[in-house]
Each structure stands twice: as C-alpha cells, then as structure tokens.
Amino acid sequence: MDETDISFFKDGLRLDGRKADQLRPVKIEVGVLARADGSCYIEMGGNKVIAAVYGPREVHPRHLQEATRAIVRYRYNMASFSVEDRKRPGPDRRSQELSKVSREALEPVILTSFFPRSVIDVFVEVLQADAGTRTAGINAAAVALADAGIPMKSMISSCAAGKVADTIILDPMKEEDNFGQADLPIAMTPNGDITLLQMDGGLTPDEFQRAVEMAMKGARDIYELQRDALVKKYSQMVEQPGREEVHVCD
Ligand code: UDP
C-alpha cells in the first residue's frame, strides 16, 4: 500500500475526523510513579507514553562524570506490545536516534552546571504507539523533569506537522505518518526557541514554512496542557493537610 491507495480526507476531515490543523486529544498526568524523582504519563491520540526521571545522582560508570556539569541520559524504549507487528525488545538504531535527538531537545533548558559530576537520567517507555512517540516522549519527559524539581530555564513542548494529499496537517497519526508525503517533528520553549527540528519526506520552502508554523502552534497548545497538569498536581498537594507546603510559580 502507498499514499495513492489511501484517501486521507473525507468531506474535508481526516481519517479520525480531525481538521487539518487540529491536535489529537491530549491527556497528561504528573507524578504517577512512586519510586521515580519525577514522572509523567501522557496520551496523545493513540500514543501512551510514560516518563521517569531520576537524579541528579551519582554517575555510573564514573568515567562519564563531567567536572563542571551534570550529564543528561535519555533512554527511549518502545515496548514490544506497543505496535501492531511485535517489536523486537531491546535497543535498535531507531531508539538510539530517538534517544539522542530527544536528549538534545531537552538539554538546552536544563541547568546542568548546578550539578557537577552528577547524572540526570530520563527513561521514556512507549506503551502504545500511533506515530509521534518521540514528541509524546519529549512532552512527558519535560514534565517529569519539572516534577523531579530539576531546575530548568523553561518547559519544552513538542509536536509534529506533516503533509498528506498535498495538504499540511498537524500531529499526524500512524496512517498519515506511514503513507504521507512528509513528517516534521519539532520541540521548542514557550518563547519559540526550537531545540529539535527533523524532517522526513519532501516539502517546498513555502510548505516547510507553513508546517513549522503549524507545529509551533501545536507545541504552544501542548505547553498550556503541560503547565495545567503540573499546576493541578502541586495545588492539590498544597491543599492536603499535613503535607509539606509546595509553592508553584506562574
Ligand atoms: N512503528 C512501528 N514499529 C516500529 C517503529 C515504529 O509500528 O518498530 C510505528 C509506530 O506507530 C510509530 C510510527 O511507526 O509511532 C512512526 O514512527 P517514527 O519512527 O516516525 O517515530 P514517531 O513518529 O513515533 O516519533
């Protein structure tokens, strides 16, 4: 099957009923793992992803230590049951690439110089995949870092745009990603500083411009949801009698 075999639009709407510039439903829950320093569960459409953050803590093996800053490790892992055709467990080239670009998307906002010789470990587990797992993972990891109390210059929010049937679309789902003409994931700060930009497929300069703008708009909307999820968790903690007071800044 290729893109010519698929009808991506019906009555102007996409296969799942969305408009071209519409995100899939997003659900974010903070602090879902008792033994992690910070954690987050996210659903973005059919993607279900969990992120756990540990640290800053001692680096093992020790030769990885940096004298002036913390190192950040990011492990993206896709569960074998997360996709239609069982995925062979363990690391592969794809998960190594996604781990690398996701770490690089987050590292610029983490104040690593506060924690010399330590490590901040980020684990991202994809439980169910439906295209956009790297963006969902980055969104969950950024919230989990904040939940762990790691000092950050800002939040990071991530979203993809794509192209199907010569139309630029927001947040492609699996059929659109697999059989579409282009996929362009980004990650950025709330100010619009981009920390990840990748592209598969082909776009004209004008389409590229529109796809980046659309993905940035999606990331801005996701930022609001990340913020709401953090505020919700910590305002509940403050309201619970007998617990240490937590101040949440705007
Ligand atoms: N996928 C799959 N098996 C794999 C890898 C990926 O079925 O071994 C699917 C999965 O739904 C994934 C999608 O293909 O979300 C797109 O993968 P891609 O490499 O583009 O990364 P993503 O869009 O998830 O960040």
Image (spheres, rainbow, N blue to C red):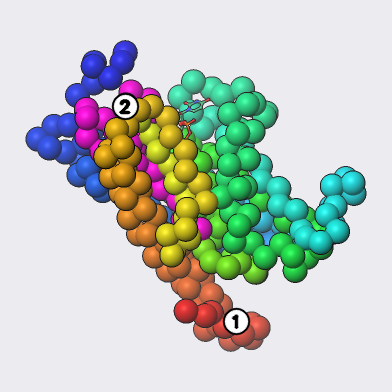
Across and down, in percent, residue 61 comes to: 88, 45
Q: Residue furthest right?
A: 62
Q: Nearer the viewer, residue 4 or 173?
A: 4
Badge 1 element:
loop
**Mark 2 nearby-residue class (10 Å; few <14, some 14–19, many ≥20):** many
Q: Residue furthest left?
A: 11
Across and down, in percent, residue 78 comes to: 57, 34
Q: Disc 2 residue type?
A: Gly
Residue at 16%, 38% in the rendered image: 13
Question: Which of labels 1 and 2 is toward the front?
Answer: 2
* C-alpha separation, residue under disc 1 versus residue under disc 2: 46 Å
Q: Is residue 161 above or below residue 56?
A: above
- Which residue is denoted by mark 1 in the rendering? 246
Decide if residue 24 is in sight here.
no
Q: Disc 1 residue type?
A: Val
Q: Is residue 117 above or below residue 23?
A: below
Decide if residue 235 is in sight here.
yes
Residue at 72%, 56% in the rendered image: 120
- Which residue is denoted by mark 2 in the rendering? 180
Magenta residues (range) = 156-181
